[in-house]
Image (cartoon, coloured by chain):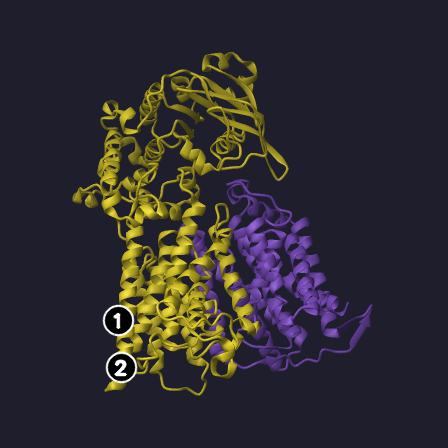
Chain colours: A purple, B yellow
Amino acid sequence: MSSFGFGLITAAVLAIATVGFTMQFAVTNVLNLAYGSVMINSAFVSYYLNIHGVTPWVSLFGGVFTGAVASWALNRFIFTPFQRRNLAPITVVIVALGVDLVGTFGLQAIVGGGYVSFHQSPGKEFHFLDMYFSALQLVILAICVVVLGLIHWILKYTRLGKAMRATSANPNLARNSGVKIQWVISTTWLISGALCGLAGTVFAMNTGVFEATSAQLYIVLLLAAMFLGGPGEPYGAMFGALTIGLATEISAAYINPQYKDVIAFLALLGMLTFRPYGIFGSEKTL
Amino acid sequence: MSQYLFYLATIIVYGAVDAMACLALNFEFGFAGISNFGFIIFQSAGAYAAAVLSMPAAATSNGGFQQYVLGLSLPWPFPWIGAALAGGLLALPFVFLVGKRLRGDFAAVGLLVSAVLLNVLVKDYVPLLNGDAGISIVPAPFQSFWDPQGLGYQFVYGAVAVVLTVLVYFLLKRITESPYGRSLRAMRDNDIVADSLGKNLRLQRTVTLVVGGMVAGLSGAILVGFISLWAPGAWGYAETIVLFAAIIVGGAGNHKGAVLGAILVPLAFEEVTRFIPPLANPALVPALQWVAIGLLIILFLWFRPNGILPERRRFLSGNPKSAEVPVPTGGESDALIKLGNLDELNFRQLLRLEETANDNRVILSTQGLTKSFHGVTVVSDVTIAVHQGRVTGLIGPNGAGKSTTLAMLAGTLPSSGGQIFYEGRDITNVPSNQRASLGLVRTFQLASEFKKLTVLENLVSAIPKQSGDSFWGAMRGRRHWGREDKENIERAMEILGGFGLEQYADAYAGGLSGGQRRLVEIMRAMLAEPKVLLLDEPMAGVHPNLAHKIGDQLTRLAEGGMTILMVEHELSIMDAFCDPVIVLAEGRVLAQGTMAELRLNSEVVEAYLVG
């Protein structure tokens, strides 16, 4: 039961991250493998604000802002120009890998290789139903619920959300129906980038100690969660993140904790092999 | 002095190992289009295999301070052979991932994740390969009677490594310059189209990964025999990115480019940084190394996407001047296309049409064919019959399900319900490439040329049953397939001449105008020797004069025994060439008959003709 609580927190962070990741894939068809490096860079911006006297929950906004601007710029100045050249989709993925190296190790070159942590106490401990949560974890959980609620509201009840879904389903048709594609894409990258920055910061807070390469393998969990729910499906991403988050933490209670991420790997490989369009998805038109 | 010679020997071995790895990855990525983001695990499999095959049993080795499996104490060359086999065998589980229908970038991510997963498992499960600490004191070949620390030994080792790299170079070249290599490059440029022309994608990708994996495994064995240790830290997933950077810099699809890239990127990067004096922050140099690799990838893909030595164009026509013929660009040139001596071509001979009497029997039919996407039915209960030796038209308004029906007939899309019969046989579950081999060949609505193949290569690649178009055929060399290939090229040139495009034989198909690409696609489909040719809007974007000339030839082909089913929007084409015509609307068969009959059918007129 206590691992269920752990899993819930892992899932909350992962859900924020995966929803952003999958939204980027939905509107631009790019597997943004540089996502982890944007996360950790955002976390470090937030951390530097924090050690210069800003309270953690305010510094969080620095991380969100960094994620939003960095992701928007990444799409605007790197991915979009490459996509305009009509290259194979894999080229953009390779570019994203290059960006990931630059982002992660550029950060490491600047901040050094050491571990750091936020100036913040995890707060009082709360206990219910055999589960222990620190105040910090409860806040993360609350942030997750609020943010995902916000995303749900945007997707469901705003013109922007409708335009996003239209762009995702068929960009050409959306353009011909009067959707301002470029605006939708830019806004999506801003919003998803904000989620990325938020996820990176709460990930770092939740981990406790972190360094420049801490988020390097996070991309595996992201991919697993995204493919489980179907690529490009924000609600699928939430489902996938919950499943992967709980599965990894609960399995850690039964097997060697070092192998806990193996569940995510296997889920991802299984999905890619048998149902690349997600548990609920169906095959797309060729 | 001798310390420089030792250093030189080391550089030679490292350079050979990197070159071999880059040749293998380039074979997979640059030629066959498989983005193997997990490449490093194949090299690692070879290194571990060579280590545990050459080492004594774990319990007896140095007091048993390290744990590992096997430990067979095999003499050279068995550990190296075992390493190549291990690399090849490791490829087999991934065949499911790179199979037919998975997007290239999804498969790449799957391979990347597999590489990370294996690294984690090997690192954390110590009994297998000694975990994070790795395996050390791996014996060097012949060390029982020859001191591996000696200069002579090290240079001989380097020489062996170089000789093996040269052998690998010629082996891979033998494959890539054969008709089989052409099929691999066709798959790289457009896998769905290659599949529709009868190429077995899964088999081609399996062969590619196995061959690439064996070479990678061998390179790992050479490395571990020299440095005598191997640990998870040496094969993090990011090492694959370094090799990708090497190929992007050197030139994907060019063997020499791969070797050049290996020397410029992994070798130079490792070696140059050795000479940087130690800094206060020891992590800085490695970090900046990774940044440089990342930047190299981004900048090269932007400024020089084909690398320093781009893929070589193959001039097959034997006309050296063809390189200088300007390729027209833009649509306006389509009006100027002049067909050549098309009417004089002997299609029956060129396309090896069988001597079939035009017996008008039903050759292709469907029974209740249905397709739905996401619960929406786009083709519903379509039952049609196509008669041998006729040009059958398929018309209908946008979204009527014409292209979907055609795709199901060819097997590009699986059907959701109903059956398809071809020559009396139920082919509903026959894969598309086998349907093509049976003589059911399609074209595509959107441009589908193999961009980085020349026009001539596009055509020749479609010819079925080439003796050089298999792995073993390719291995038997030009003596085995050369003469036949020459005949195939001549046949393709003759058809090109008929369509008035012979001067573009050696131009990249991707550089042609829209109308010309259409012609290339039609010619290519013809050369696949179809019994039934399925054409998806072949005249779209083609100048009307040209369209009618093509239509005449299709009629001629049908008279010669070929059956044609054609999706088309243009009613004048239907009027002139198609009989009978099937009308689809909202996924259902609305009517069929001659155009004259259909014009009298009020339902059809309402649904389509008036619009």
Left or right of A183 in this view: B513: left
A22 and B462: which is toward the camera: B462
Extreme residue in the right direction: A129
**Which residue is tagged 2?**
B151
Identify the element where label 1 is drawn.
helix
Place of residue B51 in the rendered image (x, y in percent of width and height, measured from the top left)? 43, 72
Foreground residue, B327 or A212?
A: A212
> Above or below — where is A36 with respect to B460?
below
Residue identified by numbered label 1: B159
Chain for numbered disc 2: B
Q: Nearer the viewer, residue B30 or B516?
A: B30
**Percent from the top left, x then y, of residue A133?**
76, 72
Report the residue at 28% width, 69% height from top. Answer: B160
Q: Quadrant of residue B440?
A: top left
Q: Secondary structure at mark 2?
A: helix
Instruction: Check disc 1 and give the amino acid type.
Output: Ala
Return the chain for callout 1.
Answer: B
Q: Is residue A245 above or below residue B184?
A: below
Q: Is residue B571 left or right of residue B348?
A: right
